[in-house]
Image (spheres, grey):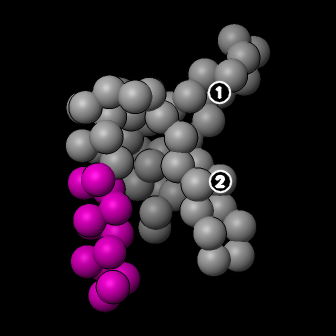
Amino acid sequence: ALSRSIKAAIQDGSLKGLHVSSNLPPLTHQQFADDTFLFGQGTVPEARRISSILDSYSAAAGQ
């Protein structure tokens, strides 16, 4: 659910992610076991969008 929300935000343009190479898609997140790393541009709108996604995920997961 979290990955899908992040991918949807990339597709609708509300998240840009971190561009590490012009040949690769932007890096937005990496998930390992019980850890999630989020990457993005250091802008207020991007931070707000990430916060909104995490709030929605938290509410859906009951956390």
Q: Quadrant of residue 57?
A: bottom left
- Residue 30: give its label: 2
- Say which element carries label 1: loop
Residue 20 x/y as whole percent = 68, 22
Query: In the image, which is nearer the foreground, mark 1 or mark 2?
Result: 2
The residue lying toward the viewer, choosing from 51 and 8, is: 51
Q: Earlier in the sequence, mark 1 or mark 2?
A: 1
Q: Which residues are magenta?
A: 51-63
The residue lying toward the viewer, choosing from 47 and 13, is: 47
Give the residue type that dot 2 points to: Gln
Q: Quadrant of the C terminus?
A: bottom left
Residue at x 46% of width, y 67% of height: 1
Residue tagged 1: 25
Residue 49 x/y as whole percent = 28, 43
Residue 7 x/y as whole percent = 48, 45
Please give left or right for residue 28 compared with residue 47 in the image.
right
Q: Quadrant of residue 45?
A: top left
Please give left or right for residue 23 compared with residue 1 in the image.
right
Give the residue type that dot 1 points to: Pro
Q: Could you tell me what secondary structure mostly forms the magenta stretch?
A: helix
The correct choice, above or below, for 48 with respect to 57 in the image is above
Q: Residue furthest top?
A: 22
Instruction: Characterize the local packing of mark 1: few (<14), some (14-19) or many (20 or more) Cα atoms within 10 angstroms.
Output: few
- Say which element carries label 2: strand
